[in-house]
Amino acid sequence: MAASALLVVCPLLVLLLVRRRRLATPSTATAPASAASREQLLSRLPSPPGRLPVIGHLHLVGALPHVTLRDLAARHGRDGLLLLRLGALPTLVVSSAKAAQAVLRTQDHVFASRAYSAVTDILFYGATDAAFCAYGEHWWQVKKIATTHLLTARKVRSYRHAREQEVGLVLAKIREAASTHEAVNLTELLHVFSNDIISHAVSGKLCREEGQNMVFLELAEANSCLIGGFNLEDYFPALVKLGIVKRMLCAKARKVNKRWDELLEKLIHAHESRPASERGGEESDFIDVLLSVQDEYNLTRDHIKAQLEVMFQAGTDTSFVGLEYVMVELMRNPRLMTKLQAEVRMAVPKGKEMVTEDDLTGLTYLRAFVKETLRLHAPAPLLVPHFSMADCDIEGHTIPSGTRVLINVWALARDPRYWENPEEFMPERFMEGGSAATMGYRGNDFAYLPFSGGRRMCPGINFAVALIEIMVANLVYHFNWELPPESLE
């Protein structure tokens, strides 16, 4: 935990403790039996030494939490489980495929919820979206909308022309830079590309009006900072009950949500104003689809906005991270890049202006390359935390309700118990005859969970993989890549 964060935490905790002492009475001084029982169950779970008053094990978590948690689990965990006291919240870290299977399949109905977060509650309209919504009837409804209306294989295919158009724009920018022997900022290009594809899916032809695609990008980055940054309420939920603290913690989230609301309201209104004949069709965007099923699923205006926002957020982040790391691994491994280029260039008719999605059929090495990239560089190395809704058994340990669960998919994908030479980049392991040839993205292999598994598995797999594959195929078809000299020093 950073020293600057501790400087913020300590005075606030003093304020909280003083408030509790003032409110305490003889009748509340003794913890309820259920709370005592819960603590007893937690005390039996493997946990590292060095727990400090108030902050617990927070000081043990470094700048790369997935790496730190892997190392802590290796030293102090048992049966793939490790309990950390991160502030006031008990957090169970899962670091074995067997334990992950218990959480995501055997006891999936118990761990399918999310812990309350004031930040996500504000950003996503009461957390009524598919990613952060608490488990229940509404979550089933929004998940069904995503899987049967927004992100089906057929729907993803309908956006192929938009993907190919956006790929063409990226290729033109790279050619322009190459003609003057300039270095290309791939991070920026791929981030904008992923953003523009999602923008098109969300709002169709309106995505570029008045620079709205770039506003989407700016807001998605703001969301990422708020969700992925250090939030006091994630570790000390009681602080949010203090009015002054809640206002301080949530002020930025409210500002970002207000900007989202203005943009989404404008886009929804523009869609509603169009003739009905222009709203349907195979290439209808997410807004059209949600408006068409609004009555069927009893969706409010805020429900629609929450779903649009999270689709944009998840789609941009997952695709961009995957794309960037594919290109990193290509430049780190020139021999493998040559092999991938040979496959793509053999499959595409000579002289063809660009690789289209029809050309991707049969590119087995390309698919293996992407899979191996997502093994070593999962877009969300710890996944979105799960939350237990009842006491249950995992690997002979009783996990009490109200426990937050982190599944370290980064550690699972580098575990030598499941992977040969786990630190090496070897796409061949996913080829026919390889040790991981049968592994896919659907969460059935619990050592490989780039898109999670179980009820909370990411519904956008088809969308993300299609975006990554068409971009990578074109980048290696048209260009040879190498790192700039300064990065090799």
Image (tube, rainbow, N blue to C red):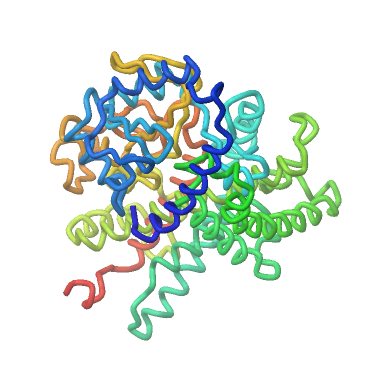
Residue 276 x %, y %: 84, 46
Judging depth in this view, the residue of 22 and 424 nearest the camera is 22
Looking at the image, which residue sits at the far bottom? Answer: 180
Snapshot quadrant of residue 214: bottom right
Q: Nearer the viewer, residue 23 or 237?
A: 23
Residue 157 visible within the image: no
**Residue lying furthest front:** 26
Instruction: Name the quadrant containing residue 254.
Output: bottom right
Along the line of sight, the residue nearer the viewer: 215 or 404: 404
Q: Which residue is found at the position 20% from the left and 36% from the top?
A: 415
Q: Residue visible at 62% across and 26% down?
A: 140
Quarter location, residue 281:
top right
**In the picture provided, is 440 more to the left or to the right than 331?**
right
Vertically, is 272 above or below 236? below
Q: Quadrant of the C terminus?
A: bottom left
Question: Number of marks in the image?
Answer: 0
On screen, 284 above or below 205? above
Location of residue 82 in the rendering, given as x and y in whole percent from the top left corner: 28, 30
Q: Position of residue 197 (x, y in %)?
A: 55, 56
Image point (18%, 35%), residue name: 74
